[in-house]
Image (tube, rainbow, N blue to C red):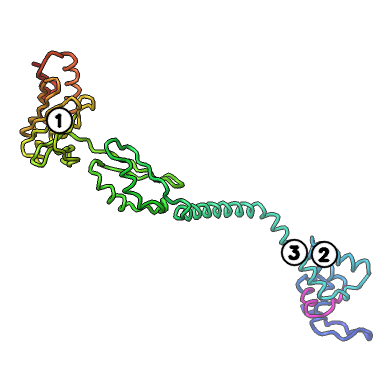
């Protein structure tokens, strides 16, 4: 069906463009909001009052839009008096109200994000600060403490490690400490422990001497590994004499060393001589004249326990054979 032609303009009505006439014609029926906004956006006045309510409905809920509409109603102005700037002001007010609503509904999630990133930042700052402080002079070594030393001179160890004084605890030279402690043969192992803010603790484990070996140079005190701890012209008191076939590099010496290490500390002090012609023939001489036939180093812990019970139950015996701990012999 063809659309009827528009009526001619009145004499006192200014000439309008084709677009203006189209907007006015559509506003009289079911003019959509988009055509009314197009008409206003192009700089033309709205032709009828029917288009204005539709246009203002698009900014419903906006306080600024409501105030503009109320002002128009109170002034009893025609819709043609509404300017483009006022329409866009109402649209902006509607968008502003919409953004406010979005912020209100997303407030909880934004708060969670702020707390999360704040916690991450605090942890990162704490870690970074700790690393910086650990490598700074605030945690420099000012005191060296030696623990576990009985035969080693503590003052001598501290003096040997004076090169570490003034260094940050995190930058202590481990190779330098190792080089300094190799001068003390009595130290078997050691461990470094940093105690902020200024203490460096050195825990040492001393070697356990098992006896002395006589030579042309004197009497050498050795441990189970054959490390010479000291050499003196006379045999030191409390150390048994080692009579080992093949010297410190032989299997007999290794077996004798393991046997001496397995003895209880109070019982070891009563041993005056250790003899071994092979790895399976270790014999101990005690200070009270008793002889202990030990055999090999195997099952030494059990042999030591059996020997202690045999001596307690047979104090008058002079020979104890524990080479077979399940069938010991007492003579």
**In-front residue for pair 243/128:** 243
Q: Are marks 3 and 2 in contact (CB under 8 Å)?
A: yes
Q: Which residue is mark 2?
A: 64
In the displayed structure image, the side of residue 33 where residue 288 appears, left or right: left
Residue 276, by quadrant, is: top left
Residue hosting label 1: 240
In this picture, residue 124 sits left or right of residue 226: right
Secondary structure state at the residue bearing disc 3: helix
Q: Looking at the figure, which quarter contains the C terminus?
A: top left
Q: Given contact means CB atoms under 8 Å apart, are the residues at marks 3 and 1 in contact?
A: no
Neighbor class of circle 2 (other Cα within 10 Å; few <14, some 14-19, many 20+) is many
Q: Looking at the picture, how far across and down is residue 82, in whole percent?
A: 86, 74
- Does the magenta-highlighted stretch encompass residue 38? yes
Disc marking residue 96: 3
**Residue sitting at x 11%, y 25%:** 285
Alpha carbon of mark 3 to alpha carbon of mark 2: how far? Answer: 10 Å
């Amino acid at each position: 069906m063809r659309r009827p032609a528009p009526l001619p303009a009145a004499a006192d009505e200014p000439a309008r463009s084709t677009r203006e006439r189209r907007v006015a014609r559509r506003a009289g029926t079911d003019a959509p909001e988009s055509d009314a906004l197009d008409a206003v956006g192009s700089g033309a006045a709205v032709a009828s009052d029917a288009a204005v309510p539709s246009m203002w409905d698009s900014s419903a809920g906006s306080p600024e839009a409501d105030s503009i509409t109320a002002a128009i109603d109170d002034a009893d102005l025609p819709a043609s008096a509404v300017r483009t700037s006022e329409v866009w002001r109402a649209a902006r007010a509607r968008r502003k109200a919409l953004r406010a609503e979005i912020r209100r509904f997303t407030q909880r999630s934004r708060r969670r994000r702020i707390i999360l990133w704040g916690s991450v930042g605090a942890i990162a700052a704490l870690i970074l600060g700790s690393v910086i402080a650990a490598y700074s002079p605030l945690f420099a070594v000012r005191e060296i403490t030696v623990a576990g030393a009985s035969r080693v001179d503590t003052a001598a160890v501290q003096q040997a490690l004076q090169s570490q004084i003034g260094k940050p605890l995190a930058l202590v030279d481990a190779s330098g400490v190792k080089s300094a402690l190799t001068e003390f043969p009595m130290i078997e192992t050691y461990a470094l422990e940093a105690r902020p803010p200024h203490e460096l603790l050195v825990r040492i484990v001393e070697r356990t001497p098992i006896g002395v070996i006589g030579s042309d140079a004197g009497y050498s005190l050795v441990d189970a590994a054959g490390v010479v701890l000291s050499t003196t012209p006379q045999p030191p008191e409390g150390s048994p004499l080692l009579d080992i076939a093949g010297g410190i590099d032989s299997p007999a010496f290794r077996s004798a060393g393991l046997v001496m290490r397995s003895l209880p500390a109070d019982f070891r002090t009563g041993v005056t001589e250790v003899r071994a012609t092979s790895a399976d023939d270790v014999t101990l001489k005690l200070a009270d004249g008793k002889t202990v036939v030990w055999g090999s180093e195997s099952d030494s812990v059990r042999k030591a326990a059996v020997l202690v019970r045999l001596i307690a139950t047979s104090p008058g015996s002079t020979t104890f054979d524990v080479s077979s701990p399940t069938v010991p012999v007492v003579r």
